[in-house]
Image (cartoon, grey):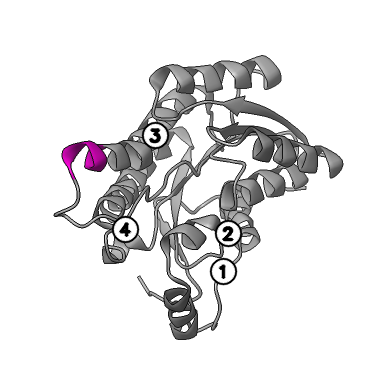
Amino acid sequence: MKHKNKVAVVTGGVRDIGRAVSLKLAAEGAKVVVNYHGSHDLAQETLAAIEAAGGQAILYKGDMTSPADVEGLIAKTTEAFGSGIDILVNVTGGLVARKTIDEMDLDFFNHVIQLNLNSTFLVTKAVVPHMSEGGSIIYFASQAGRDGGGPGASAYATSKGAVMTFTRSMAKELGPRGIRVNSLCCGMISTRFHDTFSKPEGRIAVAGNTPLRREGAPDEVADTVSFLASDEAAFVTGINMDVNGGLVFS
């Protein structure tokens, strides 16, 4: 198992891609701290699935845009598994709503930026003091960060573009300490995100224009996360990896 006895923190770890990542890392031997902010039922289901498969995990409910809650996450992690953290996967984020520039106000724009970018900063700042050489940090950017996103997604795309830049900056800053930092730029993955924010006909069209002629699956994204977090990717840092079936080439 490639992550045996490692401690992994997964924010936003109980829904869709986050859940798949939590399950995958646990299946590969990691002790997983699964953060969530919304559904208690989904959190319990995720924990039960990990334990049923023989994995080890704990849950932590908290808002990753709140410095106090982020500190609580670290305290919970060290209490359960000791002071070292080997893997951070920051899945926390979202589109919130599709709004044009005419429809947005400053509060909405700031909320989206805080959800996607501030959470990335806060969790990184809190985890890094507990991470030593060989540590791996993985963020979730988006294809939207490359191409500006779909209709009404400018705030989301802007925040994800910033995550991509933050990835490169952290790779340079933390590399001398032996910590690798990468992000994923996911395309059309079959999740509640697209169930909520994408029209069915649009999804069909995008899938049809993708060289692999389908949407991606959360498990496929989780497999990529597991690789980037592992020693198999020991010389990979600072990349914003496309996981989009060939829809967009960077």
Residue 72 seen in the figure? yes
Residue 156 as seen in the image, left or right of residue 220: left
Sequence-first disc among 2 and 1: 1
Quadrant position of the C terminus in the picture: bottom left
Q: Is residue 135 left or right of residue 40?
A: left
Considering depth in this image, is 245 or 84 the residue closer to the camera? 245
Task: Report the magenta residues as a range.
Answer: 105-110
Q: Is residue 4 left or right of residue 220?
A: right
Q: Which mark is residue 119?
A: 3
Name the amino acid, label 4: Gly
Q: Are marks 2 and 1 in contact (CB under 8 Å)?
A: yes
Secondary structure predominantly adopted by residues drawn in magenta? helix
Q: Position of residue 246 (x, y in %)?
A: 46, 77
Question: Can you identify the residue that label 4 sits on?
Answer: 145
The residue wearing badge 1 is: 216
Across and down, in percent, residue 37 comes to 53, 32
Q: CA distance from mark 3 to mark 4?
A: 16 Å
